[in-house]
């Protein structure tokens, strides 16, 4: 039984990374102009426009008809489809996928990743790992729903302003951060944005990220893991990798780094770095 994976562009994965993968773009709107994330709006173009624009762009969920169209096309060549979406608490995209799946009973299953960007990417990668091992669709969905509870996404932001403007945190929380000139550390917890702490300067924030990784039990390097960054430069994420070599130097010689696109970058702004991993069990 062949299995096709469909995800949204909030996962910051490209279709070229796997066969049997469809990435449906989210819509990013600047003023009067709509763009398709990762299609006619590259990550570089997005951040150039974000920096220059006087208005915050708006992101839109994927409508059911686009999911239905992709599902129908996938099922022309494959037996079953698994859809992995960004958190249902942050977007209506999961609901759209569920509505579309009703048109293909028994052949399409939908997983709410309860995460975004590199955290969502972990689930997509693990799904393909199980496909390669010959695991059936029902068991893959079961394992993804278990695994997502162990995924940790921790990020250091340059500012809380974009989260405030996008309605993801309160104005009071954002104001407290700006007055103190702090670097906020956030996470995705239970599918929502949570502020883990506020540190004065990048060094303290970096230490807070390390503390959070240890508090989670450490990184399970047998599972997929990713680093991510927003903006036009990789310098911050490269410095983070170098400053925290002790976390991975004896565990792996490869750290996959993703650029975070417009869907999530709209809400974080440039200058953010993130680490996503599966927490060790026990």
Image: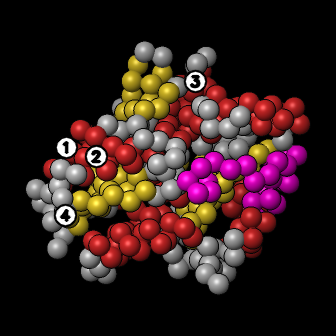
Q: Quadrant of the N terminus?
A: bottom left
Question: Which residue position is annotated with label 4?
Answer: 106
- Which element carries disc 2, helix, strand or loop? helix
Q: The magenta stretch spans which residues?
A: 188-210
- Residues at discs 1 and 3 in contact (Cβ within 8 Å): no
Residue 156 on image: x %, y %: 71, 49
- Residues at discs 4 and 3 in contact (Cβ within 8 Å): no
Q: Nearer the viewer, residue 41 or 212?
A: 212
Question: Which residue position is annotated with label 1?
Answer: 69
Residue at 82% in and 60% down? 207
- Alpha-carbon neighbours of circle 3 within 10 Å: few (<14), some, or many (≥20)? some
Distance in Å between CA atoms under marks 4 and 1? 17 Å
Is residue 120 depicted above or below 3 in this figure?
Answer: above
Q: Quadrant of the C terminus?
A: bottom right
- Residues at discs 1 and 2 in contact (Cβ within 8 Å): no
Distance in Å between CA atoms under marks 1 and 3? 30 Å
Q: Is residue 187 left or right of residue 16?
A: right
Distance in Å between CA atoms under marks 1 and 2? 12 Å
Identify the mark nearer the N-term, 4 or 3.
3
Q: Of discs 4 and 3, which sits in the foreground?
A: 4
Q: Nearer the viewer, residue 247 or 112?
A: 112
Distance in Å between CA atoms under marks 2 and 3? 30 Å
Question: Which residue position is annotated with label 3?
Answer: 56
User: Magenta stretch containing residue 175, yes or no?
Assistant: no
Identify the mark nearer the N-term, 4 or 2.
2
Is residue 64 depicted above or below 51 in this figure?
Answer: below
Question: Which residue position is annotated with label 2?
Answer: 99
- Alpha-carbon neighbours of circle 4 within 10 Å: few (<14), some, or many (≥20)? few
User: Magenta stretch containing residue 203, yes or no?
Assistant: yes
Residue 269 on image: x %, y %: 63, 36
Identify the mark nearer the N-term, 4 or 1.
1
């Amino acid at each position: 039984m062949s299995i096709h994976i469909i995800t949204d562009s909030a996962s910051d994965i490209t279709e070229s990374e796997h066969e049997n993968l469809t990435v449906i773009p989210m819509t990013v709107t600047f003023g009067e102009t709509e763009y398709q994330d990762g299609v006619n709006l590259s990550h570089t173009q997005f951040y150039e426009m974000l920096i220059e624009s006087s208005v915050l762009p708006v992101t839109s969920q994927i409508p059911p008809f686009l999911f239905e169209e992709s599902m129908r096309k996938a099922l022309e060549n494959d037996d079953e489809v698994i859809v992995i979406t960004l958190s249902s608490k942050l977007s209506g995209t999961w609901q759209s996928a569920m509505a579309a799946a009703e048109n293909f009973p028994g052949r399409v299953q939908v997983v709410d990743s309860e995460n975004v960007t590199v955290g969502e990417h972990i689930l997509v990668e693990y799904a393909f790992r199980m496909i390669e091992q010959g695991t059936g669709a029902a068991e893959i969905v079961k394992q993804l729903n278990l695994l997502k509870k162990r995924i940790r996404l921790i990020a250091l932001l340059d500012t809380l302003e974009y989260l405030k403007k996008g309605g993801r945190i309160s104005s009071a929380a954002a104001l407290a951060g700006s007055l103190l000139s702090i670097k906020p550390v956030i996470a995705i917890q239970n599918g929502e944005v949570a502020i883990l702490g506020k540190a004065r300067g990048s060094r303290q924030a970096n230490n807070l990220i390390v503390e959070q990784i240890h508090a989670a039990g450490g990184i399970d390097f047998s599972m997929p893991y990713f680093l991510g960054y927003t903006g036009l430069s990789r310098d911050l994420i490269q410095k983070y990798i170098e400053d925290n070599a002790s976390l991975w130097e004896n565990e792996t010689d490869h750290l996959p780094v993703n650029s975070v696109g417009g869907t999530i970058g709209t809400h974080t702004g440039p200058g953010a770095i993130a680490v996503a991993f599966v927490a060790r069990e026990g």
